[in-house]
Image (spheres, helix red, strand yellow):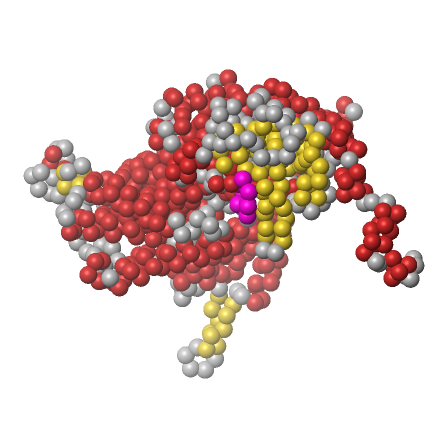
Amino acid sequence: MATGSTTPIPVTDRAEASALPSLIKDAGLFALVTLGLCVPIVSYRTDLGQGIGLVITSRWGTVFALCAAIFVLRLVQQLYLTGRARRRAARAPVAEGASRLAAILAPITLVIALTLPLLAALLTGSLGEGRYWIDLGILILTYVMLGWGLNIVVGLAGLLDLGYVAFYAVGAYSYALLSTVFGLSFWICLPLAGLFAAAFGVLLGFPVLRLRGDYLAIVTLAFGEIIRLVLINWTDFSGGAAGISSIPRVSFFGLPFTAGENGFAATFGLNFNAMHRLVFLYYLILALALVTNLVTLRMRRLPLGRAWEALREDEIACRSLGIDTTITKLTAFALGAMFAGFAGSFFAVRQAFVSPESFNFLESAIILAIVVLGGMGSQIGVAIAAIVMIGAPELLRNLGFLKAVFGEGFDPNEYRLLLFGLAMVAMMVFRPRGLISERTPSVTIAERGR
Amino acid sequence: MTLATGITRLATLRDEPPAAGPGGPADPVLIVDHLTMRFGGLTAVNDLSFKVGRGDITALIGPNGAGKTTVFNCITGFYKPSEGMIRLMQKGGETYLLERLPGHDVNRLARVARTFQNIRLFPRMTVLENLLVAMHKPLMKASGFSILGILGLPAYRSAEKAGIEKAAAWLDRIGLTARADDAAGDLPYGDQRRLEIARAMCTDPVLLCLDEPAAGLNPRESAELNTLLRLIRDEYDTSVLLIEHDMSVVMQISDRIVVLDYGIKIADGTPDDIRTDTRVIAAYLGVDDEEVAAVEAEVGLTGTQAEIPA
């Protein structure tokens, strides 16, 4: 018995230790075979020369690129297969591993998010040079916030909402109209936009109270389209398809970001830099997103939040426990819509221009995809999914190195959505319940003594 | 909603003598009067009247399809009865007309809790969370309808702690403390049944309605269930109404038994009365061949029946 319990450990250790060199050898063999195949097929190419006869051009670069690609692919495949075998052997630690990974990722992501303008400035040389990264950060954080907002409705309350972008539009148009028509400042419009969007959330909530699943999805989808079509066709109110332009820019709690006497830079004794506003916008959306997160995390521990989750699990049981399902559903719709309203008014103040074009069904689909990819209900999962969904297509713009493989005529930009689609299919095959599918209990018995 | 509650409160019917049949319990917690439930052309429950005594365990039995679960759904607000009145009397004297309350108010105001024939837990939530969801009403109040709770005020924290204490006490009682943080859907069947009863009890009910609590339990688990139900009757101000097919449970723990067949009450009495009641035996086991023959002779079927021998 003693040997039985001790021997397996060194065996697996040895297996792991010997695994990597043997895998490299295996991948090297694959690369060698590729080389052997490529030499007659790929390495020389004959073209029609000037006049009569053929000209031989050598393409050794492509040959080596192909060999290297095969080497890497084989290595990754083998590593994945051995990894999977090991995971199968010890299934329980995987779940722990995923939640541990989330526990590590959350603070890292937060620190990067807090210092992004600084990082961008340091890495690219100056704040102006880092503009692209800060812009990307703002875009990603907007979707993180929308994802967290929709997570309340879809992830917690289990109400499939395909028209979430409607509330985003309500928030954006609230700010656009209130500021251009009544001249109200952003800081007054922000809470108003949230309230309007929440009111629309309740408005949508009432007719769909009895619907579930597919039927609910259809009605919410229609609601999203109705809002968009009203914005396009009610020209007197919303400016129609042309949208609303020259929306007032954001101010630093009353101090405008201008070069003049009373500007932000002059008041704080800084040199004027157009980037100040962008950095401020970045921190504004970060703060809004973090508030969304904090409220959601708090709600999960409150009876209303638990009632949302209970509603997702079993509506009939909820009713038998004295929970008013009407109020519970409406609050979920309203709170989710409110955060979309905040995000919408941020969108309007950042763009200084809104038009119905920005609020089409694709936006709803992207936000829903973020929630589903992240793992419904998981906050960090949704954040990571937003980074991947919004950031990855941007990063794929910088795939110049692929030209080395596929020739000069290859334009990676044309393929980035294809690659992205493939990545999403792979993701759904390997982690069908989302990136972080483990549900964290809102309360544990260990807290009894606390 | 508040208006409906007001009307229900006004409709205190204390002066009126109970209309249910004679020999019922002296201090009823629930009076079902002339309850009829029709689904289109089908009458599932027909003119049913019975009473549930305060502090009693009352069993509702009958063959399959007798209308027991329909009666339950009427009492707990899932169906609106076609006719009849269902009154719940709380100890303080408040009377609620259950058939007039919206579904969730049957539990929230009248404090009638129920379990389901096919268990309805919140499977992905933990055992502890399942019990805390049942304390929705007091916790909601403590959290200032979420507004104060969002701000993180200490009032809610202490209320939540008290809630967890209460849940922990119930977990000790049903022997699930060790599994408190596991998903409820991962529990074995018998544990899920007990958890559902504990969850219903966490709403502090006046009347607990159990729909086949012993279904699918082995004999040891059935015995445990009996102990649990007796404990609920003796230590809490909770009366129990249960539907059950397992006669070892029904006969051992019931103070009173109501027997239904084809939506009609055929017997109502103590377990000893029911055991010897010929109509109950007939409903469950069928009647003797001689009796069938006698009835057939009465309606003139004898000749034709006799010509088709087995």
Asked whether residue A377 appears in the rendered view, the answer is: no
Q: Is residue B278 above or below residue B292?
A: above
What range of the chain is rendered magenta?
Answer: B75-85
Residue drawn at x 83%, y 45% is B287
Residue A397 placement, left or right of B44: left
- In front of the other: A358 or B294: B294
Residue lying farthest left? Answer: A261
Q: Position of residue B160 (x, y in %)?
A: 46, 24
Residue B84 is inside the magenta segment = yes
State left or right for residue A259 relative to residue B12.
left
Residue found at x 48% / y 77%: A54
Instruction: Judge from the rendering whether residue A182 lies leftward or rightward of residue B20; answer left or right.
Output: left
Residue B83 location in percent, x, y? 55, 46
Instruction: In the rendered view, tell whether residue B93 sits above or below residue A29.
Output: above
Residue A335 figure quarter: top left
Residue A180 screen position, x and y as percent:
16, 51
Q: Quadrant of the N terminus of chain A?
A: top right
The image shows residue A27 at horizontal and vertical percentages of 60, 50
Against B44, residue A105 (above or below) is: above
Q: Residue visible at 47% across and 39% down?
A: B101
Residue B34 part of the magenta-drawn span: no
